[in-house]
Image (spheres, coloured by chain):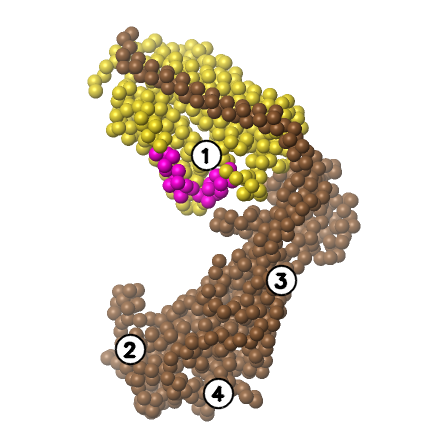
Amino acid sequence: MTEAYNVTTPPRRGLLNKIADLNWGLLFLICMIATVGFGMLYSVADGSWDPWASRQIVRFALGLAVLLVVAVIDLRVWMSLAYPAYILSLLLLIAVEVAGEIGMGAQRWLVLGPVNLQPSELMKIALVLALARYFHGLTVDEVSRPFRLIPPLLMILIPVSLVIRQPDLGTSLLLLAGGFGIVFLAGINWWYIIGSIAVGVAAIPIGWQFLADYQKNRVLTFLNPERDPLGAGYHILQSKIAIGAGGVFGQGFLQGTQSHLNFLPEKQTDFIFTMLAEEFGLAGAAGLISLYIAILAIGVLTAMSARAQFGRLVAMGVCITLFLYVFINAAMVMGLVPVVGVPMPLVSYGGTSMMTIMFGFGLLMSVHVHRDVDVPRRTGAFW
Amino acid sequence: MARDVRDTARQAVFTRRAAIASIGAMGLFGTVFWRLYGLQVQQAEEFGILAEENRVNVRLLVPQRGRILDRFGVELAANRQNFRVLLVPEDARNEGISNVDEALNLLAQIVDLSDYRRRRAMREAARNRPFVPITVKENLDWEEFARVNLNLPDLPGIVPDVGQNRYYPVGDHLSHIVGHVGRVTEQEQLRDNDPLMRLPDFRIGKLGVERELDRELRGQVGTSQVEVNAVGRVIRELQRNEGEPGNNAVLTIDEELQRYTAAQFEGESGAAAVIDVHSGDILALVSEPGFDPNLFTFGISEDDWAALRDNELNPMANKAISGQYPPGSTFKMVVALAALEEGIISPREQVLCSGHITLGDRDFHCWRRRGHGAMNMRNGIKHSCDVYFYEVARRLGIDRIAAMADRLGLGYETGIPLPGERSGLVPTAGWKIATYGESWQLGETLITGIGQGFMLTTPLQLALMTARLATGNEVIPRLVRAMGTNVEGIAEASPLPQLPLGFDPSHLAIVHEGMNAVVNELGGTATRSAVTGEGMSMAGKTGTAQVRNISSAERITGVLDNEDLPWRLRDHALFVGFGPVEAPKYAVAVVVEHGGSGSRAAGPRARDIMQFALTRDPGAMPAIGNMVQTSGNDEGQG
């Protein structure tokens, strides 16, 4: 193919210009949700900043810095970094696999000096960028050619198969769903979609064989909570009781008896939404979900208004990831889906998922700031 | 700016798809809202009541571990009450004590608290959340425990508690068989998803029967439902399911014979096995020195561990099944029986022993420099004449020797449920090619004929070999008589079916005659080891296993006496025997590591053990535990 675009060089924008152009509403919503998180972590510790809330604040501040830096970097730079970032993430995933063999058992971390790196988190961002870059170069007709679909399929399935071996079911589901979401948005033919859903359903019995025992247990327990009254089924039951006991307006800040009586597992991480629902009731829980929906709405509008396909796909990729986090976590603690270890973004305690999500917001913001930038078909490395 | 029409099409598709995805997402969020509404509005009252009642917490209870008993019901491993002191940091805080250190200071005024324990408690307190009880001190004596209880009002956050811990009443001489328990390691947790594995109080078998039969001994986890108040303190217990206690294990061991046997080794390193030749019951299986298994219950101290590890006599190894020794001359009966069964030599045929035999350019020496003169088979065994067996081995060939060794139980694991059993080694021509890529040499056949060279056996295998030689039956060794919660009834004395190995009785008789002459005839190699007493006697065979090769230089200058060598290089002393000679009941094997000659170091010990066994006659006494009818190989799986 020949270069068909008339590339016009947009006027160079200064840093201040870009900062002034940030989506301040989005930033405000992010800060609000994070603040809710601080409050809940304060409550989990029985009204103490120690040990979770204080550290979470530091991490959020760090995350904000990351967001701003990512936001002012030109989309074309992200485009050229997409493939290198993907390959680096893939190599790190393999490294973890190798190190995991040596270290025995589940290993998701690479210790690089003072930093504990979780390559599967990097991959969440890198996969979005790489797929967006790939589809940026294809026309609508090209997208649905079988030959053109092989690379993105491999791009998705290779990291998914590595992550599922760690074993980390939650993250591999996020990667899988996020990746296919982008393929869908790129405009592949509906027949592929119907076909792959059919194949997916048929593959369930086969996939079952590959699940680890604890994962099978979770699914079986989800289908029949009575089966494991001491384990996961117990936790879900307790979680539902706590949410239900919250009622419409909740039991009040620091007053959630169920959460504070240790009926809940990991209430500072995966089950923090339960605690919020108990202490602030339907009003609090629905309010938090609404904040996420507002962010998602801004994200979708940002995506639609972007000039470059790359920007659109990146923005929607971030939205899909955020949506999956929020939906899976909320649905899990209410017993709508099996227990998979997915945190509530910005609220659950944890540094790595915080960084991933803030980086993602940074990209979303960058798409917003650079919405009028034309991104050439081929930029930088590997093309 | 000229926009590509293709991008316009692409953007249209994207916008449509993004809208569809958004609608889908809203639908899914709708289910979340619907569920929230259902839980928090429709079912709020119901869940409110449940929550009010939900002051119920489920705790796991460690089941009572099964006991290990000897054949007469003597406790080898039992449980005893463990008085201990726990600390709940949160409670201490509620009662006005600011930190763990202070709470421990108060406790230290009442009971002795080592720095090590203190540091460990502090570490655990830092790691756990404040309401989790941490163990400060275990195994208090009654007086200390009473003092803690008495002073409880002045000890904020301290909780006295009675747990159970494993206890080994009999001590060192059964350490390798019974083994010990210990804390669960992270790796063990990964391998086993029994909820018990996550309890800090839980102990699993690490060695011996405790390890191999762990699943049976462990039992089923119990649960306790407790009601807690608004700050999480336990108010009362609502329901208790004790779980199922583990099965008891009855071993074939006779504790008294075991103790006596172990005592024969004082200061020496070695191993011994006594087998009931009719049932295959292992009555004693000793590896000396042993260790005190109680050291491990609460985690062994560094000093104790260093002492065990650095001991030259290697107390942690179970030499009776994992020590592999060349059988030396105790192997000669195997060669003799093979020769008779194969018909390659008549028992009366004489071989002239001149002190050595020459093969090619190499001399093979008899232990007796000036030779034994004309030897027939019985005298060959009696005098342990090496030249006679060089000749017999030469005629037999290695593979026929190996086949007989295999029938008598050498060269493979007996399969008793103990960890670390080794198979020993019975070399064959094929084995040597597979292992070294070299063909078998005739000279190697000769030295195999006197139990040297590549041959390796464990003491248990030697006892088994002797039991099979004594009866001509395929004796199967057995360590566990029964497993179950109720095994203490007297068992019927139904002898186990024993399959004959199909030897010609007259051939066995020749071998027995030779072994009898070794001990009970003037000029035999072990006449000092005769067993005396009404109806008591023993036939046997000495063995001396070289640890190093004697160099040709030494042959000229004269071989150093064993006593002049460093301990590590001295020969191993062996003895195998059965008794009484006419109607065998017991087979015994003794190995004294670096003990020197078999007739001096091993024979007399075997004599005393056999004398004791015949006097006590544990095989004839009513034992407990219904007989396990399966062979030893099937026991203790899982």
The residue that label 3 is drawn on is B78
Residue beneath the point at 44% across and 46% down: A104
Asked which secondary structure carries label 2, the reply is loop
Q: Amino acid at mark 4?
A: Glu
**Left or right: A15 as drawn, with respect to B534:** left
Which span of residues is magenta-colored?
A199-222
Residue beneath the point at 57% across and 74% down: B492
The residue that label 2 is drawn on is B397
Which of the chains is brown?
B
For marks 3 and 4, the one nearer the N-term is: 3
Q: Amino acid at mark 3?
A: Ala
**Left or right: B155 as drawn, with respect to A221:** right
Mark 3 and mark 2: Cα distance apart in space: 52 Å
Mark 3 and mark 4: Cα distance apart in space: 40 Å
Q: Are marks 1 and 4 on the same chain?
A: no
- The image's mark for residue A170 is 1
